[in-house]
Amino acid sequence: MSTTERGTTADREVVVSRVVDAPREVVFEAFTEVRHLSQWWGPTGFTTTTTSFEFREGGVWEFVMHGPDGTDYPEWISWTEIVPPERIALLHGEYRGDPDAFESVLTFEPEGAATRIEMRTLFPTRELRDRAVEEYHAVEGGEQTLGNLAAYVTGSGR
């Protein structure tokens, strides 16, 4: 995304990042198999049940996130671009065809022996971004999710 594009989309974007103390191939691999994803995906206190998973461009991951209060959140992700071990782009909604689905791009950059992962999420409208931030705590949830990823790949638990 160019600086000009960022300038026109900043009001629709949420960006979180984290340095993970593991090589980027290891961090990237944590996204490639459901046996990995199910161990760390989601904010603290959430669990994930997968109904279908195919990690390839055009493939889909359908799952339910279970909140700590017992609320179930149906989720749907389609992988739109996969460039191992550098980048993953996806479309994320509640279901296929969700008009409120958002796009996310994850980048994996070596930082010494560690990896900087950045998750840049672009919502269709500013209102949807604001709702995600205010009602669903998207920033905190993204930071917790990346924290869970870091704990998983370094073996320090969830």
Image (cartoon, rainbow, N blue to C red):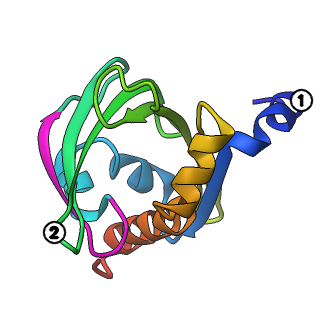
User: What residue is shown at x 45% (from left), y 32% (from top)?
Assistant: 101
- What amino acid type is highlighted by mark number 2? Gly
In percent of width and height, residue 83 lies at 50, 29
The magenta stretch spans residue 44: yes
Q: In which quarter of the image is the C terminus?
A: bottom left
Judge whether residue 120 can be spotted in this image: no
Residue 70, numbered label = 2
Q: Mark 1 points at which residue?
A: 4
The image position of residue 118, as x and y in percent, is: 61, 52
Identify which residue, 57 or 70, lies in the foreground: 70
- The residue sitting at 52% across, 59% down in the picture is 138
Question: Which residues fall within the magenta stretch?
Answer: 42-52
Amino acid type indicated by mark 1? Thr
Q: Is residue 149 left or right of residue 21?
A: left
Distance (Cα) linking label 2 and label 1:
42 Å
Q: Is 62 left or right of 139, judged from the image as shown?
A: left
* Residue 28 position (above or below residue 144): above
Residue at x 65%, y 64% (from the top left corner): 112
Mark identifier at residue 144: none
Task: Tell me if 16 is positioned left or right of 138 in this view.
Answer: right
Residue projecting furthest to the bottom: 156
Mark 2: few, some, or many residues within 10 Å (few <14, many ≥20)? Answer: few
41 in magenta: no
Identified at 89% across, 29% down, the residue is: 4
Q: Is mark 2 on a helix, strand or loop?
A: loop
- The answer to which of 45 and 134 lies nearer the viewer is 134
- The quadrant holding residue 90 is top left
